[in-house]
Image: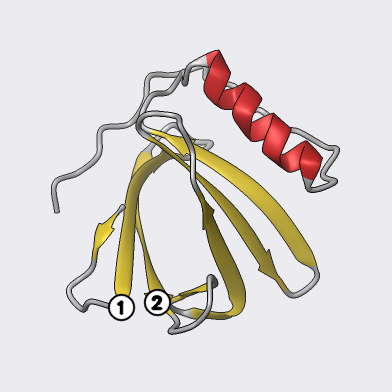
Amino acid sequence: MATGSAPMKLQLRATIRMKNGLCVPRKWIYHLTEGSTDLRTEGRPDMKTKLFSSSCPGGIMLKESGQGYQRFLLYNRSPHPPEKCVEEFQSLTSCLDFKAFLRTPRNQEACELSSN
């Protein structure tokens, strides 16, 4: 995650492996709101995103909520984050009364992050 071109923007870039095996670059731009901890996702006015602090190197924890859904996400630069990072994430979500936990399988190599 990096500061965007304007001081009230954050940009998150990732390369995501699709079901067909292709790696697809993605970019999300978050707008900071004065006096609020919510981030607004560009192009998704119904969605709120909150960032949580984490002691996990190379990782971020997010809570997304929108029309009828809430989810917590753990992103990490490593395809196999340290177990302590996963445990910290599970602890946070369980404290916030989220019981279901899904860990996506890592059957292929991680995608390379494109430079643009």
Question: Is residue 104 visible in the rendered structure shown here?
Answer: no
On the image, the x and y values in percent for residue 76 come to 43, 33
- Reply above or below: 103 against 26: above
Counting residues from the N terminus, which is met first, the one under dot 2 or under dot 1? 1
Report the coloring of the rendering.
Answer: secondary structure
Report the side of 41 relative to 83 (left or right): left
- CA gap between label 2 and label 1 equals 6 Å
Element type where label 2 sits in the image: strand
Residue 38 % position (x, y): 54, 72
Tell me the residue that label 2 is attached to.
31
Residue 103 picture location, percent across and down: 66, 28
Give the image location of residue 73, x and y in percent: 59, 45
The C terminus, quarter of image: bottom left
- Residue 1 vs 18, above or below: the answer is below
Q: Amino acid at mark 1?
A: Met
Reading the image, the residue beneath label 1 is 8
